[in-house]
Amino acid sequence: MRLEFMVLALSITLAPAGALFDAKASGAGPWVMVVPPWRSADLIAAKAGAHIIGPTEAPLGHLVAASEPGAAKRLADAGAWAVLDAATVTAFCGVY
């Protein structure tokens, strides 16, 4: 019984997270950049030619924008764990 509950709990948790992280950044931004807590989000954004926007930040996620094409790939190359389209994250999380 305990094993079935753990499998159910993991599938409920991992399936939406997998769907979200499979939605790679494809547009011109803005994006949600997920960075490890020991790295500076400002430095990663600056290295990629982007900048952090928005009045608030989540512990790991930051809303970023850039005027140059290809910044989403450069964000990932600079050390971001994931770079996702902000519209995809909004559709997944809902609007408040």
Image (tube, grey):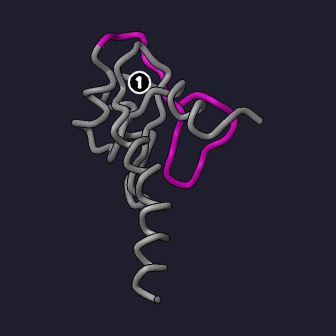
Secondary structure mostly seen in the magenta stretch = loop
* Image quadrant where residue 44 sits: top left
* Mark 1 neighbour class, 10 Å CA radius: few under 14, some 14 to 19, many 20 or more: many
Q: Is residue 96 magenta?
A: no
Report whether 40 appears left or right of 63. Answer: left
Tag 1, which secondary structure?
Answer: loop
Q: Residue furthest front?
A: 1
Above or below, 6 against 90 in this view is below
Report whether 56 appears left or right of 63. Answer: right
Q: Position of residue 5 (x, y in %)?
A: 48, 79
Q: Position of residue 91 (x, y in %)?
A: 59, 30
Q: Quadrant of the C terminus?
A: top right
* Image quadrant where residue 54 sits: top right
Q: Position of residue 82 (x, y in %)?
A: 35, 42
Residue shown at the point (45%, 39%) measured from the top left: 42
The residue labelled by disc 1 is 50
Residue shown at the point (26%, 27%) measured from the top left: 73
**In this orientation, which residue lies closer to the viewer: 9 or 67?**
9
